[in-house]
Amino acid sequence: MNRRIAVVVILALVAAALLGGFAAYKHRLGGEGASAREIVVCSAGSLGLPLKSLAQSYERETGVKVLLKLSGSVDIVRQVSQLGLRCDVVAVADYRLIPLFLYPNLTSWYIVFAGNEMVIAWRGHGGSLAEALKAIESGRASYGTSDPNRDPCGYRAVGALALYSLYYNDTRLLESLIASIPGARYEVRGGILHIYIPASFTPRGGLVVRPKSVELLSLLESGEIDYAILYKSEAVEHNLTYAPLPPRANLGDPGLADAYGRVVVHILAGTPQEKAIAMAPIAYGLTVPSNARDPGDAVEFVRYVLTHGREVFESHGFIFYTHPRGYGRLPGQLGGLAVEEGSP
């Protein structure tokens, strides 16, 4: 009898081990139980559609669930650095926000991987850039930007219009924009145009401001605004008519970095959090904060974006870099995927 009991116990233990191994195997393949593994990706709104597509394919292949939280990039880095927001991956529309807010205390590395350019978009067909800018300048049209204090597209919209004014040596467009933001001002120092955006304001005239650039799309579609100043990728994704700004104003040409730097936008002006942001070619950045709950899966997702993202991002109107740039101490899993530039 004792021998029979012992055999039953041994068989039960063997069965339990086999079932445990099978469960682990299913977990790795993305089967039952895989949903227990998940990462949170805090992303700029303009990256939402391509990252959503990549997140879905990554989840199918690995079983790791990817939760996307979309917000303005300035909001993201401020909440991570000041409020302890949980993000396993941070993806921002201006990579410089990472060294400004997160490096080196909350991350030891980041990668610059994609670009974009500024355009003016509208509904319907016809029209031109000259007509759009004339209507905005004269106050005959309503137009939207995202909030410069919360979203890089907002301070880039301000910077792009300022660069356009400098390029054509005509400040009327800049004056109209500044007049629409109560408390805003500008001055020229050492040949550099500095624009100061107050921490809070209620826009007036034809200007409409929303927290994220993607929120301007519904305003265009409903006819609440006539024009929006946003990224080319957003116009492409939503089949809008758009006109690119000249290269010296659209922030899309890496070879014109010095020209773009003639304009500096000060966000959160007049507060201890004020940041002076020189205009520069648009470049998106990725990192994994040091307080990520699952840094291993987070880094693997970054690797997936870099190795599988080109076709997806380019189909959405982005420029996906052939040679991403890495700063700081890159994780070993990302070795060879970025040109390491050393410390920021």
Image (tube, helix red, strand yellow):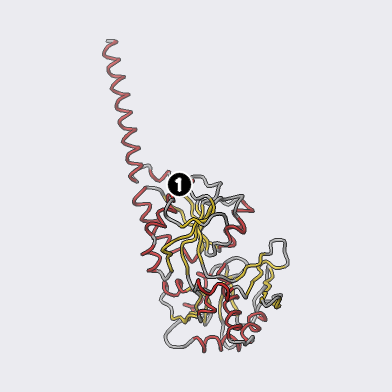
Q: Residue at x 42, y 73 (%)?
A: 238
Q: Residue 106 versus residue 122: which sits nearer the camera? A: 106
Image height of 52 relative to 160, above or below: above
For residue 25, which quarter of the picture? top left
As drawn, the residue found furthest toward the top would be: 1
Q: Position of residue 174 (x, y in %)?
A: 63, 82
Q: Residue 77 versus residue 104: which sits nearer the camera? A: 104
Q: Position of residue 233 (x, y in %)?
A: 45, 71
For residue 260, which quarter of the picture? bottom right
For the image, the number of numbered tags is: 1
Q: Position of residue 152 (x, y in %)?
A: 57, 67
Q: Residue at x 30, y 25 (%)?
A: 14
Q: Quadrant of the N terminus?
A: top left
Image height of 296 relative to 13, above or below: below
Q: Is residue 342 left or right of residue 267?
A: left
Q: Mark 1: which amino acid? A: Gly
Q: Residue at x 43, y 68 (%)?
A: 319
Q: Residue at x 46, y 88 (%)?
A: 127
User: How many neighbours does mark 1 have within 10 angstroms: few (below 14), some (14-19), or many (20 or more)?
Assistant: few
Q: Is residue 65 left or right of residue 75?
A: left
